[in-house]
Image (cartoon, rainbow, N blue to C red):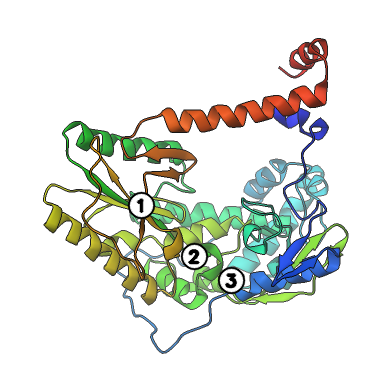
Amino acid sequence: MLFIKKLRPSLNTQSDSISAKISLNVDGSVLTDDSSIAESMNSYFSSVFTTKDYVNFPTQDCIFDKKLANIDCSANEMKRHLLKLKPNKSPGPDHIAACILKSCAAELAPSLTYMVNKSFCVGLLPDEWKHADIIPPHKKGSKSSRENYPPISLTSIACKISEKIFFDRVMKFWREIDLINSNQFGFLRGRSTATQLLSTFNDWAKSRNLSIPIDAIFLDLAKAFDSVPHERLLLKLKSNGIVGSVLNWLKHFLVGRKQRVVGRGSCSDWSRVTSGTPQGTILGPLLFLLCINDITECISSIAKIYADDTKIYREISDPITDCQILQDDLNNLSEWARKWQLRFNADKCESMRITYSRDRSETNYFLEKPLKDVDNFKDLGVTITRDLSRGNHMSITVNKANKVLGSIKRSVGTANTNIHTYIIFI
């Protein structure tokens, strides 16, 4: 990985963000002007925000006796966070560089500690901390489609330090009350895509070896991070023990945010952020985890979650009964999403029967529309087939490696140079 990272500038590849020259196809028109692209991107990001709905607003009581009402930090803790900063970390719209904060850690720590503790106490943030520069990286698919660029926020580094302190206190509290769903593997220490896949494959392999088929449903939440309604998220925070100035601070962190898209020397106008847990922030993932923490409470099938990637599955011992239970779970998930103003992207949700035999599921599963039944699915970067064979995934991985190797050969030149390059970087 280090070798590829060092060599990348000499490869014939392009940057995967709008910092590189791109063109966008928007409603049949091709945009090439940097300013127009930035405005178009920002307009699209704003279009996916969720409209507030107070008519069908849910209720939820707090089931925990323990509460988290106050947070503070010490000057020593602040200094440690400042010293851990990476000097080349990109600043937010305030343009306060990480290298300055790090080099002046001892001098800045007392004043910054006072400011952050005051912010925690009164439940308010400086407006500048709620402004974000968006530099959207290309995710996958066509580079000319706005849908393939997630809005990753660059925010104030000082704010991120306060978020880190806040994150540690809230996560410690939620661990104490055993809140976090044990089936969630994303954004949590000690859990990862690898541990989630191992846990899932262990379940599937046991059933397959007993010749018991499994029906799995792979779910996709549409624009999950950007569409979380703030009012419903705050309700969940309150019902899970977050109260007082801590709740007020989180409310002020979410409400009244602004963002703009920047790239290649151009930037869009500022736009208001009316929903979502901001991607690129420290607290965004934590808040999203809480948002979907109760997703498994309405189903009886097994669920495995990594951030917003969710799959549910169950053994099909009785084709009629078990398939109906799985369909009932999908119906319940649809109701859960409607209650919390989220939406499943049915076009990207798929079903697959896992078995040694060639038998397919007798049920056409439905989630707002019929789900496509597939023979393989790419789950957390691993291509899974119906019989759990590894050949398909290995072929894809080898092909990707060969493409990278080809790029290296074309860029570096002769075999002699290849050897020298390998020695230098490896």
Q: Residues within 10 Å of mark 1 (few under 14, many from 20)?
A: many
N-term mark: 2 or 3:
2
Q: Which residue is mark 2?
A: 222
Q: Is residue 426 above or below residue 326?
A: above
Q: Quadrant of residue 378?
A: top left
The amino acid type, in three-letter code, at marker 2 is Ala
Residue 18 x %, y %:
77, 55
- Nearer mark to the viewer, of 2 and 3: 2
Residue 190 visible in rendering: no
Q: Callout 1, which amino acid?
A: Lys
Disc 1 and disc 3: Cα gap in Å? 29 Å
State the residue position of label 1. Answer: 311
- Distance of mark 2 from mark 1, alpha carbons? 15 Å
Q: Is residue 146 above or below residue 14?
A: below
Q: Is residue 386 left or right of residue 24?
A: left
Instruction: Name the quadrant containing residue 132.
Output: bottom right
> Badge 2, how many Cα within 10 Å: few under 14, some, many 20+?
some
76 relative to 201, above or below: below
Q: Residues at badges 2 and 1 in contact (C-beta under 8 Å)?
A: no
Residue displayed at 37% across by 76% down: 339
Please determine whether, in this image, residue 69 is positioned above or below residue 81.
below
156 or 380, nearer to the observer: 380
Q: Quadrant of residue 55?
A: bottom left
Asked whether residue 286 is in view, the answer is yes
Image x and y of residue 377, in percent: 42, 45
Left or right relative to 16: residue 345: left
Q: Residue at x 53, y 65 (%)?
A: 223
Amino acid on which disc 3 is placed: Leu
Farthest right residue in view: 265
Q: Which residue is mark 3?
A: 254
Q: Is residue 327 left or right of residue 172?
A: left
Q: Secondary structure at mark 1?
A: strand
